[in-house]
């Protein structure tokens, strides 16, 4: 019995020593982890301060306005539309102009020689070059109309599915004649895309060069 007690005591002492070492080891590691975290936070703060300080000292980027080929002109929209040679396209163009004007609440302006645009926005490229462009509009082309909008028509698949005969290419919507599409869906599409274009317009910094 005495021998068994001695063995039990030795075993208990060993277990106790192991437990003490384990606790001591954990306690020793904790301050190191905390110190490492503090060190990392301090380093990050220093980097952030350095970047902010550098940005504050940097000179403001100079924006150079450039004139695009498709720039707004003083030409008469009505004269342009009335001068279209094809009678059907001329009637459609005048009707389309009315839809855009009513939906956007903006006056029609000629952009370049063949685009009727509504609203405008300014964009600045990464190089610092900037220009103005229209938010949405249309252009009568040979045998069809091209409709434009900042933000594209592609994202409005639900309306496009109900529109009627059309094509999408390069972000533009193409229709041959107004008789091929649902007039109410077309109006809704113009309204939706114009609202989206208005949201995007003020954010157009560094979109492209």
Image (spheres, helix red, strand yellow):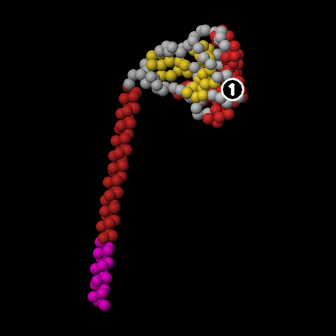
Residue 16 magenta-highlighted: yes
The residue lying toward the viewer, choosing from 52 and 126, is: 126
Q: Which corner quadrant of the image does residue 125 belong to?
A: top left
Above or below, 17 relative to 28: below
Under circle 1, the secondary element is helix
Q: Quadrant of the C terminus?
A: top left
Q: Quadrant of residue 21?
A: bottom left
Q: Which residues are magenta?
A: 1-17
Residue 191, can we see it? no
Pick the front one: 2 or 189: 189
Residue at figure coordinates x 35%, y 57% from the top left: 30
User: What residue did someone put label 1 on?
Assistant: 180
Q: Quadrant of the N terminus?
A: bottom left
Residue 86 lies in the magenta-colored region: no
Relative horizontal placement of residue 93, taking residue 26 as reference (left or right): right
Q: Residues within 10 Å of mark 1 (few under 14, many from 20)?
A: few
Q: Main secondary structure of the magenta part?
A: helix
Q: Is residue 86 above or below residue 175?
A: above
């Amino acid at each position: 019995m005495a021998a068994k007690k001695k063995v039990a005591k030795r075993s208990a002492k060993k277990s106790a020593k192991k437990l003490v070492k384990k606790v001591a080891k954990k306690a020793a590691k904790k301050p190191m982890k905390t110190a490492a975290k503090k060190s990392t936070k301090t380093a990050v703060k220093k980097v952030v301060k350095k970047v902010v300080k550098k940005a504050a000292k940097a000179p403001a980027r100079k924006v150079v306005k450039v004139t695009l080929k498709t720039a707004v002109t003083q030409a008469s929209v009505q004269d342009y539309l009335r001068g279209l040679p094809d009678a059907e396209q001329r009637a459609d163009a005048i009707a389309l102009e009315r839809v855009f004007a009513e939906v956007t609440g903006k006056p029609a302006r000629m952009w370049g020689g063949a685009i009727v645009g509504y609203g405008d926005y300014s964009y600045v490229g990464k190089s610092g070059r900037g220009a103005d462009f229209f938010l949405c509009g249309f252009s009568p082309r040979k045998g069809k109309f091209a409709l434009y909008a900042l933000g594209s028509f592609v994202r409005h698949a639900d309306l496009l599915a109900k529109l009627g005969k059309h094509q999408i290419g390069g972000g533009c919507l193409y229709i041959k004649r107004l008789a091929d599409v649902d007039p109410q869906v077309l109006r809704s599409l113009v309204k939706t895309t114009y609202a989206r274009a208005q949201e995007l317009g003020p954010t157009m910094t560094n979109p492209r060069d």
